[in-house]
Every structure is written in C-alpha cells, then in structure tokens.
Amino acid sequence: MDLSIYDIIQGPIISDKAYKLNKSFKKLVLKVHPHSNKVLIKEALERLFSVKVDKVAIVVRQPKNKRLKGRAVRGVLVKKAIITLAEGYSLDLLDQSGGQVVPAEMASKFEKAE
C-alpha cells in the first residue's frame, strides 16, 4: 500500500492525557493510518512540519465486539502515535482558543471529517 504523507497523519488526538503529555513532556499524540509504521510516521512529520523527530511510539487499540439491537457489530481499530520531538523543536497543534492548527493542504481533509 502506497501512502502519502497526508494519508499517514490523520490528525491530533485531543484529550486530557494528550494535553498533559504535550505540556509536561513535549510529546504529541496523533491519530495515524492503521497500515503506517514508525519510519513512515517519522518521515511524514519531518517533511510536513519541518521538525526533527527523536522517537515514535505506537499504541494500537483493537476493535471490540459489541451487540447492537441483537446484532453483533465490531468497533473500529484506532492507531495512535506518541511523538517525541528532538531538543529545541516544538510543535503546537492546538492554538490558544482550543482549535486545531493544521497546514493549509490538510485543512480541507479535517473539515470533511468533522
């Protein structure tokens, strides 16, 4: 599967834990494509935002089986990347008003998702 840098990074994850990781440890939490790996994520971030990535950790939340109106349904697989930037680099994906800050090329993609 050939993924572009815009397909790999699907957007920031906004939660209390992600906010604390960003402020305390200068880490970013991003939702990424399920077929991406650490190398692809690192290259995409460095090319897209012009930052140096020190470390990439991946967390995969497996889908759960549930029942809905008597039918068995399956949840959605979610793959998150926890990014540690190199010393001297910073990237704030949330502006002061709480909205998302994304490059202009990706803005249309995020507007469709909402």
Image: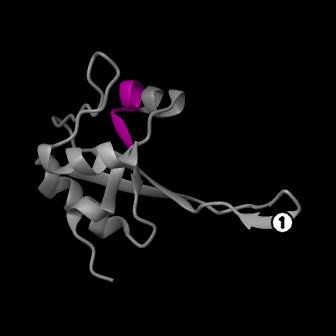
Q: Is residue 69 above or below residue 21?
A: below
Q: Is residue 49 above or below residue 91?
A: below
Element carrying mark 1: strand
Q: Is residue 64 above or below residue 35?
A: above
Q: Which residue is painted at 85% across and 57% down in the image?
A: 69
Q: Nearer the viewer, residue 91 or 53?
A: 91
Quadrant including the N terminus: bottom left
Q: Which residue is painted at 21% across and 60% down in the image?
A: 44
Could you tell me residue 17's position as x and y percent? 52, 31
69 relative to 105 in the view: left or right:
right
Label 1 is placed on what type of residue?
Answer: Arg
50 relative to 64 in the view: left or right:
left
Pointer 1 residue: 71
Asked whether 26 falls inside the magenta stretch, the response is yes
Determine the residue located farthest toward the bottom in the rendered image.
1
Determine the residue located farthest toward the right in the rendered image.
70
Residues drawn in magenta: 22-29
